[in-house]
């Protein structure tokens, strides 16, 4: 019994001596101070970094090339999250290393896990990277009219993984960002309205051009969508029974179809008022060796 008490007493003394060792507490205090400094430094780096990212995008608002507010908010949030995760991961690894924990296995395991996830989610990673560059380069914005591959319509939503295109007939196309290789954006620059007018070969070309020019001169006053006065380019093509005259007008983006319809309507009314007939096909019939006069069997509008 006394031997057991002696052993307990010895162990207790060792325990007390160990925890009253000044060098031990100096080491513990040094490690604790080091961990505290790592946490404080990480917090400061995250705060300063997030504020710096925010200020960078505020300064971008003063330059001509700007992002949409929604896209800018998305990009700011993405960069801030990347900074936060990176800094805190480094902080955790440094703290574990300070506690004499072997982080080599942890880093190797994280690398293997990341490699496995990368191989298993290649399409996802590709889509996210593609979405990041679409947002960063400002290739198109919500509300732009674009053509992506075989899909065409108005951009309804831009995400990091997919882009949604709304067609004018109501279909919603959801396209993975990794599949977007070519984009045609119709909303960045002015459009051109193109109108082809079909005239018969017997029409007085100079008279018709004068009538059309009188109509075109009045168009900019009626339609604010027209940027510059419409003009007659001249004869575009000779058809089987018609001469094609081309008219063009520079318009605001995406207003070319509307202005083209209005120009056609105005020119049609003017030509009808001055009795300028539309071209029609003529068929000449022969019976044996006797040649008959051309007879009008039908009338078809050119084009």
Image: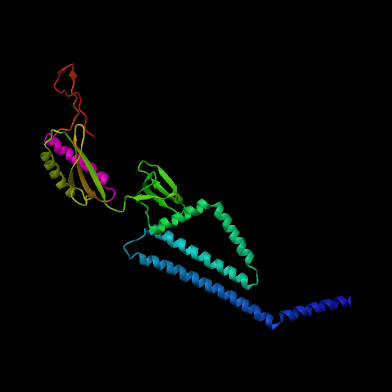
Q: Which residue is at 19% across, 34% downward?
A: 242
Q: Is residue 21 magenta?
A: no
Counting from the top left corner in percent of width and height, residue 150 is at: 39, 43
- Tally the numbered discs: 0
Q: Which residues are magenta?
A: 253-276
Seen from the viewer's position, the closer of residues 197 and 72 is 197
Image quadrant where one finds the N terminus:
bottom right
Q: Residue furthest top?
A: 288
* Residue 270 appears left or right of 167: left
Whether 240 is drawn above or below 61: the answer is: above
* Residue 177 appears left or right of 196: right
Whether 175 is drawn above or below 23: the answer is: above
Residue 32 appears in which quarter of the rendering?
Answer: bottom right
Q: Which residue is at 46% across, 61% downward?
A: 78
Q: Residue furthest bottom?
A: 22
Counting from the top left corner in percent of width and height, residue 164 is at: 42, 48
């Amino acid at each position: 019994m006394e031997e057991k008490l002696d052993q307990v007493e010895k162990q207790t003394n060792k325990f007390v001596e160990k925890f009253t060792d000044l060098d031990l507490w100096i080491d513990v205090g040094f490690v604790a101070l080091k961990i505290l400094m790592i946490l404080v430094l990480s917090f400061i780096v995250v705060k300063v970094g997030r504020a710096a990212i925010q200020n960078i995008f505020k300064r971008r608002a003063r330059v001509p090339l700007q992002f949409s507010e929604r896209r800018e908010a998305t990009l700011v949030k993405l960069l801030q999250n990347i900074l936060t995760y990176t800094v805190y991961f480094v902080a955790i690894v440094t703290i574990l290393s300070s506690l004499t924990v072997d982080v080599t296995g942890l880093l190797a395991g994280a690398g293997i896990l990341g490699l496995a996830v990368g191989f298993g989610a290649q399409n996802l990673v590709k889509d996210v990277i593609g979405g990041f560059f679409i947002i960063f380069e400002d290739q198109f914005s919500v509300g732009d009219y674009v053509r992506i591959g075989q899909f065409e319509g108005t951009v309804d939503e831009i995400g990091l993984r997919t882009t949604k295109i709304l067609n004018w007939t109501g279909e919603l196309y959801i396209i993975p960002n990794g599949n977007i290789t070519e984009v045609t954006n119709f909303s960045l620059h002015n459009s051109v309205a193109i109108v082809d007018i079909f005239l018969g070969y017997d029409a007085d070309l100079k008279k018709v051009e004068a009538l059309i020019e009188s109509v075109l001169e009045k168009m900019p006053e009626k339609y604010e969508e027209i940027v510059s006065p419409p003009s007659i380019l001249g004869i575009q093509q000779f058809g089987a029974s018609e001469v094609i005259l081309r008219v063009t007008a520079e318009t605001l983006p995406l207003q070319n179809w509307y202005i083209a319809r209005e120009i056609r309507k105005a020119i049609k009314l003017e030509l009808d008022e001055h009795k300028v007939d539309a071209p029609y096909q003529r068929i000449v019939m022969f019976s044996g060796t006797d040649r008959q006069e051309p007879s009008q069997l039908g009338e078809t509008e050119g084009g």
